[in-house]
Amino acid sequence: VCLHQEQNMINNFIAIDFETANKYRSSACSMGLVIVNNGLITREWETLIKPQPFFFSHWSTAIHGITPDKVMDAPMFEEVWSRIDSWFVKCDAIVAHNAPFDMSVLHACLEKAQIASHLPESICTYRLARKKLPFLRNHKLNTVSEYFQIPLNHHDALSDARAAAKLMLRLSEI
């Protein structure tokens, strides 16, 4: 986490969220992206991904509802990345709620696909919320979203990425 950027308004970033199929970080099965330019959401994008390795744990499916049949014909990560990698060059940061998890998934997927990429630094809205909203009972995505009255369909990758983007904008104002 870049403390310098956390203390200033971040106007150009990509909020990201992954859902995984199993215990392996390379098993991304869904990705949501929300692009923020000049402090405004300018694009939202989501995709299912054929996870590697291709199996689903019961607990993962119970959390997000994605099953093998839903991703059987989905693109592999390398195909997805070829469509979106240029978006990351134009942003100042990658934002996620619990960024260590989402960034580890991104790095594992890039490594599994043998893709070299230079990514901007990441900012964790969970850590930022803990710092700026210490009075909340916890700092989970649903709790902080509820505090700011941000609609959330939790564990839907696009909804979670959208909430993280809106949280970043709101927390930057505090």
Image (cartoon, rainbow, N blue to C red):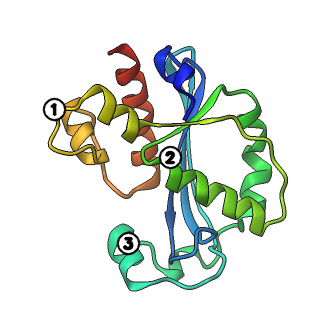
Real-space Cα separation, disc 1 to disc 3, in angstroms: 32 Å
> Which of 122/109 is in front?
122
Image depth: mark 2 or mark 1 in front: 1
> Which of 2/80 is in front?
2
Q: Which residue is mark 3?
A: 65
Mark 1 residue element: loop
Point out the tag, 1 or 3, that comes first from the N-terminus.
3
Q: Which residue is mark 2?
A: 99
Real-space Cα separation, disc 2 to disc 3, in angstroms: 22 Å
Point out the tag, 2 or 3, that comes first from the N-terminus.
3
Left/right placement of residue 141 relative to residue 39 reads left
> Is 75 located above or below residue 153 in the figure?
below
The reply to whether dot 1 and dot 3 touch (C-beta < 8 Å) is no
Amino acid type at mark 2: Ala
Image depth: mark 2 or mark 3 in front: 2
| Residue 24 sits in quarter | bottom right
> Is 125 located above or below residue 159 in the figure?
above
Q: Which residue is mark 1?
A: 135
Amino acid type at mark 3: Gly
Amino acid type at mark 1: Phe
